[in-house]
Amino acid sequence: MPTGYISVGSNIDRERHIPASIKALEARYGQLTLSSIYESDAIGFTGDAFYNLIVGFDSDLDVKAITEQLRQIELDNGRNRECKKFSARTLDLDLVLYGDLIINEGRIQIPRDEIEKYAFVLEPLAEIAGHLQHPVSRIRYAELWDKFDKTNLQQHRVTPVW
């Protein structure tokens, strides 16, 4: 059974939407592996800071079924699918990895290129799956994080009060 990793983010009522998403993911996939929660500045637009984390899970569903479930959880949490890519959001759930799959079909990209682009994806992924290798580059996530340019990094671990 493949292990998948979901990037979770919110900057609108994040204290409500992050726990709600974890509860919904647990209801669908059972036991989860959670990274720490990171607070990071909005990227690409001016807005409130995000809470971000990575959630690991095991499933035998296909990628399309998982992405459909993630979209429904977003909608259940008030996500507006008409908003711009870089904008405030109640909840953003992206399947960034699924086993060793490599897929680039329309809107489905596995592994997501955000892994190597954004600290808010790579740091929590390296925290819970640092020993795993990127399916394309074959470099471990811990090594990718070690080499990541942390100049002007606007991100830190937080302990929310929920």
Image (cartoon, grey):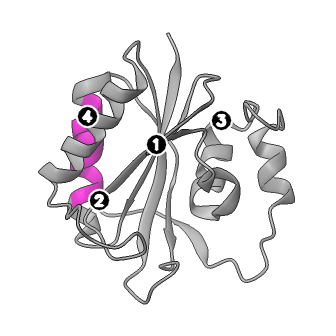
**What residue is disc 2 on?**
91
Label 3, label 4: how far apart the Cα atoms are: 23 Å
Q: Nearer the viewer, mark 2 or mark 3?
A: 2
Q: Position of residue 39 (x, y in %)?
A: 49, 70
SS assignment for the magenta stretch, majority: helix
Q: Which callout, 1 or 3, points at the residue further toward the start of the chain? A: 1
Left or right, 127 with respect to 159, comes to: right
Q: Nearer the viewer, mark 2 or mark 4?
A: 4
Q: Secondary structure at mark 1?
A: loop
Q: Amino acid at mark 2?
A: Leu
Left or right, 83 with respect to 4, comes to: left
Dividing the picture into quadrants, the one containing residue 92 is bottom left
The stretch of residues the image draws in magenta is 17-26
Please tell me the numbered disc located at residue 69.
4
Label 2, label 4: how far apart the Cα atoms are: 13 Å
Please tell me the numbered disc located at residue 106.
1
Q: Position of residue 55 (x, y in %)?
A: 45, 40
Q: Nearer the viewer, mark 4 or mark 1?
A: 1
Residue 6 visible in the displayed image: yes
Q: Nearer the viewer, residue 3 or 160?
A: 3
Q: Residues within 10 Å of mark 4 (few under 14, many from 20)?
A: some
**What residue is disc 3 on?**
129
Above/below status of 102 relative to 61: below
Label 4, label 1: how far apart the Cα atoms are: 18 Å
Q: Amino acid at mark 4?
A: Gln
Left or right, 83 with respect to 150, comes to: left
Q: Secondary structure at mark 3?
A: helix
Q: Nearer the viewer, residue 46 or 154?
A: 46
Marks 3/4 in contact by CB < 8 Å: the verdict is no
Q: Nearer the viewer, residue 78 or 31?
A: 78
